Image (tube, grey):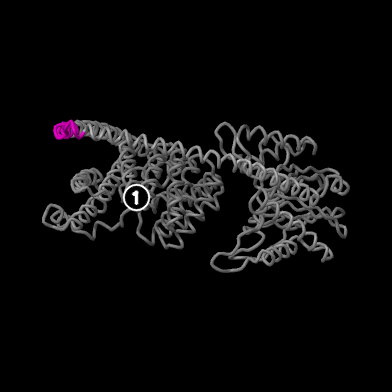
Amino acid sequence: MILQRNIFLFVTLLLPFISNAGINLDSLKGIWNDTNQKTEDRFLAAKTIAWTGYLQSYPDSSFYFSEQYFLVAKERNNLKEMATALYIQANACGNQGLNVLALEKAKSSLAIYEKIPYKTGVANSYNLIGNICLSLKEFNEAQKYYSNALEIYLEKEDKMGQANVYNNMGNILKEESNYLDALNYYLKSLKLKKAIGNKIGISSTYTNIGLVQLAMKDYLQALEYLELGLNICEEEGFENGESSCLINISECYFKQGEVSMAEDFAEKGLSLSIKIKSLEATKAAYEILYRISKNTGNFPKALKMKELFELCKDSLRKEEVVQNLQQMKLQEEYKLKKQADLFLYELEIANNEKKLLKEKTFRNSLYFLIAVIAIFLLGFVNRYVKIKRHKRIIEEQHLELNEAHGELTDSINYAKWIQSALLKTDERITAHLPAHFIYYSPKDIVSGDFYWFHEKGGYLYFCVADCTGHGVPGAFMSMLGISFLQEIVAMGDAPMPSEIMEGLSERLVQELSQKEGDNPLKDGMDASIIRYHKESEKIDWCGANNSIYIASNNDYTEYLKKEEIRVIKIDGKEGVLNELLPMRQSVGYNVFKTPFVDCSLTLEKGDLLYLLTDGYADQFGGLKGKKYMQTRLKHFLLENWKCSIKDQHKKLEMEFINWKGNMGQIDDVCIAGFVI
């Protein structure tokens, strides 16, 4: 049983979190109850009591107190304090599992923050609503609110907010078993938390990464991250996190067959979970100790652990029933109170309307009616004259735009002809590589993706690249790239791909005037360059953010370092897909640039190489309108690599068209494949 960590799911960043051991609740209550105190001091006391004093330990008391705080803020028409009180109520409901009520309170808080407006409050409310939706398994809704929160956090350069949202987005993907994308978001969160120095947050993200690796059955990586999380929890005295790390580490060792180590960590986790009275963690510890004892043949202990596990399970069920009853009671009370408030509000409105009707006179009503009619007539005449004048101007502009559009379209079509002339024709490539295909599908008339082929000194060079942007800007970059590649290869005898990458990067930085400073140009390209020697079957390859796939009957992991290759296999299918991993930097200007490095490998006859850009995998489509994703593309290539080159080309094209459906193409697409 994997023990998932869910730390501070509802507690976000609106208020500073202070340990309740360092506050005097009685003193703060005295300030709140004293109406002679300054309003600002009373509100601060109320926030501290409801948020810091009670939210974690007594969330029901936190809800009650924040409700009183809301009524006083409403009486003084203090919108910001009203929103804060509702925000605390939402967190209190969330911590009690009252998700429906929590969602309603959070949305009410959001509405007020948007009205003020107060962007930090808006962002925090978006994040909180996302957390509640995640708890309710409404992943699409959660993703929408997290994206809204992230946009504001990025605008305000709030690194802690960004880190929390990235972590939460990773949680969604982990729940959907999309582990690779989940890892990407967790790593983004981890980088920001390290920059801030938030140790508890770092521990939480380490644990999440470890759990993803555990789910992916990469037990060594899982152990590494779980132990990092455990070390921080031990340093910070965070016993809840420590107990979950110990139990999950035990699960890793058990999966690897290291039963003794698994039992040692499980016993430590059990001892700590009993100490902190965590019933969920205790249940998980008993469960894995039961499996360990059964595995080692210690059946008396296994029976005992099984009985204790069932006891914990029953206790948790009883707690859940009590919690559900409490939720029903609170929601019913809230519904009745809301109805009563609505009745009083409607009654107040009716009384005000009667008072206004009594104060009005027939003469004022008549004058008002005459004034309205006169204004309407004047406005109508003025509007009619303006519309007629604007219509004439629009018609003239429309004619000018049609002429300009025709000229622009002609220019772009001419640019397409120039770009096509620069790309090697299929006949020229076939002369050197008979068994190959190129699936090339620009998003617009011209493309930011390009392919390049060259033969020199007994070596065949092939490059597939994705330039910044698409359309006309991308096409300019692609033509520069092709020109620079021709120039670089012409100057050397038989340059390695890394040397070509370095030369290409230097020329882009020089020609585009990319310099370090406040706002350097970020134009560049992601590329994959291969040098192939036909006689020796050896390839030299270098990639900048773009991988290369080798479909083969052979697993090449033993010839390369672990960080250079990843292998995919499909049960019942012949062959494997070896993915050579690129350097994580683009060609062009990089703030933290490292030298490009080659990866060399001797292949066998019949191996099939794929060079590609990210446009195919990033295309939205399918029944749910989601991205195609790299994982799906890898499996598709592996399933069809034994087909003929012509059939593979056709299948790739049909798969892309069927996936895209009625949705528009979002990026240029280029996939090249050839047989060794």
Is residue 590 depicted above or below 622 in this figure?
Answer: below
Horizontal and vertical percent for residue 438? 77, 43
Which residue appears at 87% of the width and 60% of the height? 457
Quarter occupied by residue 237 = bottom left
Q: Nearer the viewer, residue 265 or 484?
A: 484
Q: Nearer the viewer, residue 383 or 48?
A: 383
Horizontal and vertical percent for residue 52? 26, 54
Is residue 614 depicted above or below 319 in this figure?
Answer: below
Quarter occupied by residue 44 = bottom left
Horizontal and vertical percent for residue 75? 18, 46
Q: Quadrant of the N terminus?
A: top left
- Seen in the image, is 108 located left or right of residue 663? left
- Seen in the image, is 524 located left or right of residue 254? right
- Label 1 secondary element: loop
Q: Is residue 535 visible?
A: yes
Is 30 within the magenta? no
Total label count?
1
Horizontal and vertical percent for residue 297? 48, 41
Is residue 637 depicted above or below 481 in this figure?
Answer: above
Q: Is residue 272 visible?
A: no
Q: Nearer the viewer, residue 592 or 172?
A: 592
The kind of secondary structure the magenta stretch mainly shows is: helix
Q: Read off the magenta span.
A: 349-364
Q: Given the image, on which type of amino acid does mark 1 rest?
A: Pro
Residue linked to disc 1: 117
